Image (tube, rainbow, N blue to C red):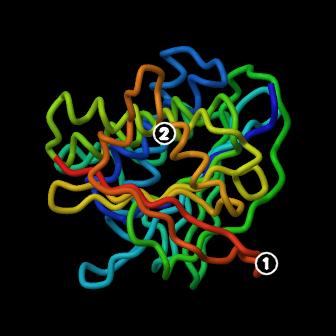
């Protein structure tokens, strides 16, 4: 299997925990993890993220959580990062209205974890030995916490994009009260992006930002090489004159530049209920 890492950035809100769990589940299943191991992974990630949601930021100044996953030896490494005031582990207290889990359960379900904290936030690193093949992916540039607007995901183009993106989009569409038919439409558009040629994505990495608000999903795909957006749009055309473009409320192309200053563009897709 090719080395592929996942990076997901969301706002530190309880409602985003489902999005994180679905993304990690899709990633782990794509690597080959079984249901029990996936369930354990979702549990420890939820606990680490919940501590960030509850303790990292003040109520009037919420910030982002960044979750990363990558193959690690014979298992998987997951990191949960915030830029808040510090980690405060929750005890296994029966009166705690949260998950009532705490650090002991993370230690029990994982094969190793560590916490690094300071004035610039906290990072929790967890390793589970689940027997996929692969080696650690190289470190990637971190997301800008000030620029986070919704759910931000980046993953190497390839077979792992579809199961992760489909779960993330489904979770967000369900949260926006999309009907079953409209949710299916949203997943179909995501599948078309997932299946697109990796050469049109800068550095072979599929970058997606999704903002869900007022019954609408605004999806921003990129950065893409010049012309990549139009090729994705053409890929929405199906035999027999059918087009997946009709499933979107709006489709636009935004010209911009990549981090290096090279010309780039983003595909903007809006999907209403």
Residue 1: image location, x then y, percent: 80, 25
- Vertical position of residue 238 compared to residue 247: above or below: above
Pick the residue in front: 271 or 31.
271
Q: Earlier in the sequence, mark 1 or mark 2?
A: 2
- Would you identify the image quadrant in which residue 143 lies? bottom right
Task: Tell me which residue sits at (57%, 37%) in the image.
Answer: 194
- Vertical position of residue 62 compared to residue 211: above or below: below
Give the alpha-carbon distance from disc 1 to disc 2, as whole Å: 26 Å
Q: Looking at the image, is mark 1 or mark 2 nearer the viewer?
A: 1
Task: Tell me which residue sits at (50%, 65%) in the image.
Answer: 253
Which residue is disc 1 drawn over?
260
Is residue 105 in view? Answer: no
Which residue is disc 2 drawn over?
165
Task: Tell me which residue sits at (37%, 42%) in the image.
Answer: 245
- Circle 1 crowding by C-alpha within 10 Å: few under 14, some 14–19, many from 20: few
User: Which type of secondary structure does the marked residue at label 1 adopt?
Assistant: loop
Pick the residue in front: 171 or 253.
253
- Would you identify the image quadrant in which residue 37 lies? top right
- Circle 2 crowding by C-alpha within 10 Å: few under 14, some 14–19, many from 20: many
User: Which type of secondary structure does the marked residue at label 2 adopt?
Assistant: helix
Pick the residue in front: 231 or 48.
231
- Vertical position of residue 208 compared to residue 70: above or below: below
Task: Tell me which residue sits at (35%, 48%) in the image.
Answer: 17
Residue lying farthest front? 241
């Amino acid at each position: 299997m090719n080395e592929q890492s996942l990076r997901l950035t969301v706002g530190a809100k309880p409602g985003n925990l489902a999005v994180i769990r679905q993304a990690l589940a899709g990633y782990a299943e794509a690597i080959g993890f079984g249901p029990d191991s996936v369930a354990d992974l979702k549990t420890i990630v939820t606990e680490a993220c919940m501590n960030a949601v509850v303790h990292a930021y003040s109520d009037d100044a919420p910030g982002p959580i960044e979750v990363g996953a990558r193959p690690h030896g014979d298992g998987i490494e997951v990191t949960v990062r915030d830029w808040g005031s510090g980690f405060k582990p929750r005890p296994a207290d029966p009166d705690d209205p949260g998950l009532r889990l705490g650090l002991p359960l993370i230690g029990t379900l994982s094969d190793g974890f560590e916490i690094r904290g300071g004035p610039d936030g906290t990072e929790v690193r967890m390793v589970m030995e689940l027997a996929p093949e692969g080696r650690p992916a190289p470190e990637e540039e971190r997301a800008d916490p000030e620029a986070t607007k919704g759910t931000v995901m980046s993953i190497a183009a390839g077979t792992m994009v579809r199961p992760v993106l489909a779960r993330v989009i489904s979770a967000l569409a369900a949260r926006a009260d999309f009907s079953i038919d409209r949710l299916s439409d949203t997943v179909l558009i995501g599948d078309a992006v997932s299946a697109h040629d990796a050469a049109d994505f800068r550095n072979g990495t599929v970058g997606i930002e999704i903002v869900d608000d007022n019954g609408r999903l605004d999806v921003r795909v990129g950065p893409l090489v010049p012309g990549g957006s139009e090729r994705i749009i053409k890929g929405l055309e199906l035999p027999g004159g059918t087009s997946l473009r009709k499933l979107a409320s709006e489709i636009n192309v935004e010209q911009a530049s990549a981090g290096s200053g090279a010309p780039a563009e983003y595909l903007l897709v809006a999907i209403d209920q």
